[in-house]
Amino acid sequence: MTGEQEGPLGPQEYKARGGIVRTQVPGEVLTASPAARRAAEEAGRELRFDFLDDAAVLKLLRLRHLDDVQLHNVGMRWRLPVILVVAAPILYWGAYVQYWESSRSQTLYYAAAGAVMGAVVCGFAVAAVREWSHRGWQKVRARAAAYRNIAHIAARNGTELPDFYPHYGPYPFAANFHADAEELDLPDEETTA
């Protein structure tokens, strides 16, 4: 990945999408505009999070990266099985099955190939939904989406921010706030950075 840094992160650094190391913008800079401060306070009450606490926000950004990596890994783990299970029956059909004279044999082949393809696609869907629906990670995503919105409000009101800060995209799904969900912690190697 372009710009990815190996080794420990600095005191105010986090990894953004794609493993790019970014430096956190301090809360007093981000909320210098009254509109951004109001948005941070309102989102903080709604999501039970202090968006003005730099240490808490840094932890949030680092957790969001870990969540992004986990979601990416689900796709990567299933990539090869999906490719093989989709490509193999199509290639086999193109090379051999289409020339079978018996329509019953072809029908059985189509049913078996469809069942195997369906099973692999369902397996991928179940694994992805399991990651997307984890309530603790949804809480992190909801807070990260609110932080992103606060950064956009600050930028629209004249605050100088790095391009694409905080560099996590919109969250069209699985970013619901669950007040009763567990608070997630960083792994030990992340907390020492």
Image: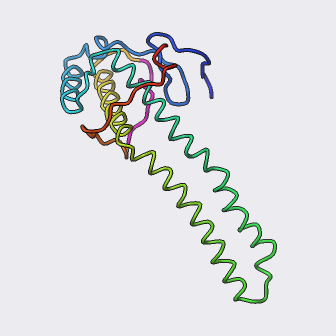
Q: Seen in the image, is 123 located left or right of residue 160? A: right
Q: Which quarter shows the N terminus?
A: top right
How many marks overall?
0
Q: Position of residue 23 (x, y in %)?
A: 46, 15
Q: Seen in the image, is 193 located left or right of residue 158? A: right
Q: Position of residue 175 (x, y in %)?
A: 34, 41
Where is 173 relative to 57, above or below?
A: below
State yes or no: residue 169 in magenta: yes
- At 69% from the left and 78% from the top, the residue drawn is 109
Q: How is the image coloured?
A: rainbow
Tell me which secondary structure the magenta stretch mostly adopts. loop
Q: Seen in the image, is 32 located left or right of residue 17? A: left
Residue range corresponding to the magenta coloring: 162-171
Where is 1 relative to 6, above or below?
A: below
Where is 80 relative to 16, above or below?
A: below
State yes or no: residue 168 in magenta: yes
- At 56% from the left and 60% from the top, the residue drawn is 121
- At 48% from the left and 13% from the top, the residue drawn is 192
Q: Nearer the viewer, residue 157 or 35?
A: 35
Q: Position of residue 83 (x, y in %)?
A: 67, 56
- At 63% from the left and 56% from the top, the residue drawn is 82
Q: Position of residue 99 (x, y in %)?
A: 80, 82
Q: Quadrant of residue 147?
A: top left
